[in-house]
Image (cartoon, grey):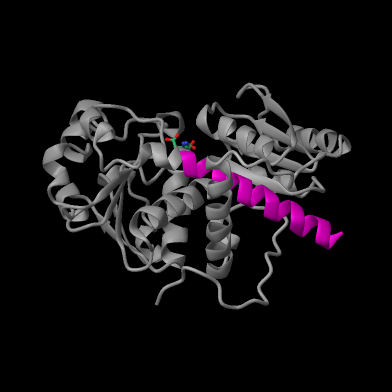
Amino acid sequence: MTHTHINNSSYTFKHTNLLGIEQLSQHDIVFLLDQSEHMLTAFRSKTPLHNLKDAVVINLFFENSTRTLNSFDIAAKKLGAEVINTAIAHSSIKKGETLLDTAATLNAMRPDIVVIRHSFAGATALLSAKISCPVINAGDGAHEHPTQALLDALTIKLSKGSITGLKVAICGDILHSRVAYSNILLLKQMQADVHVVAPPTLMPHYIETLGITAHTHMSKGIKDCDIIMMLRLQTERMNGIYVPSPKEFYRFYGLDVEKLQNAKPDALIMHPGPTNRGVEIDGSIIENSRSLIERQVESGVAVRMAVMHNLYNAMQKAG
Ligand code: NCD
């Protein structure tokens, strides 16, 4: 079964928020990836677009971010929007009540799209209930990071032609990673063969209920796979010691040239960034011609353009 295009012309994208991959059907994903491809072509050729002309996009980031914040900023500007970037110190807002006050204040400014990153799982959903315009989750704690999973899917699709049937191994800190969770949901929807690799301390106990295969040995987990997705240790979310040392973690779970031999000869390597050389990945792998890391960043802008354009449209239609 291939899902490159939607044949059903009666399909319409109806979502007015993007809080997680959980809410998306396979049709939604295929549609957004098709739209992202068009956006990528426009982005590469510097074609001016006006889909969000006169719209105001607020990027509300309660957590540190370089690439995601810049990516949303550029994507909104490429569509002709006015953008306000608000980075709020991690410590300044800690209680649900205060968060809701922030939402009400923001809402009164009548933005057209609000993009939120927060260290608490569920914070974006909570805020979206008080905000009348589309809300995009740019990462909520260890929960979801939907635009990251979509940009990863676009990168895979452009490199391999299709996602369906590919063997994908997601390796590293599965327990604390929102990138892992959103990618698992999306890759399952697209019928990929999903494997995860982590030390037992960083493997969620419920993982196999997601219909994927869990491994504690890296060489077995990445055996014959088409795509290896490496993840950073999310130390900011760890309370206590999960790995004996970064050096030991690297020895058993870091992707180096030797471990890479277990994958298919044409396997491609991905990482959402930021990378930690010598912890989860060897520096030479980042620079390897089989690394898709820079393409992921480029796909990110296109995916965020497509997501913002379609949420905005759906909201206009919903009146
Ligand atoms: C990821 C995130 O913030 O969840 N990074 C990103 O969005 N580019 C992964 C990470 O921080 O390790």
Q: Quadrant of residue 188?
A: bottom left
In the image, the segment drawn in magenta is 298-319
Report if residue 286 is visible in the image: yes
57 or 186, which is in the foreground? 57
**Please, is residue 93 above or below residue 139 in the view?**
above
Say which quarter of the image contains residue 264: bottom left
Of residues 91 and 224, which is closer to you in this image? 224
Q: Position of residue 258 (x, y in %)?
A: 11, 40
Q: Is residue 18 left or right of residue 290?
A: right
Q: Nearer the viewer, residue 81 or 271?
A: 81
Position of 209 compared to 249: left or right? right
Does 310 lie within the magenta span? yes
Q: Which image quarter holds the C terminus?
A: bottom right
The x and y percentages for residue 170 are 32, 50
The image position of residue 87, as x and y in percent, is: 65, 24
**Residue drawn at 79 percent across, 45 percent down:** 131
Residue at 37 percent across and 51 percent down: it is 204
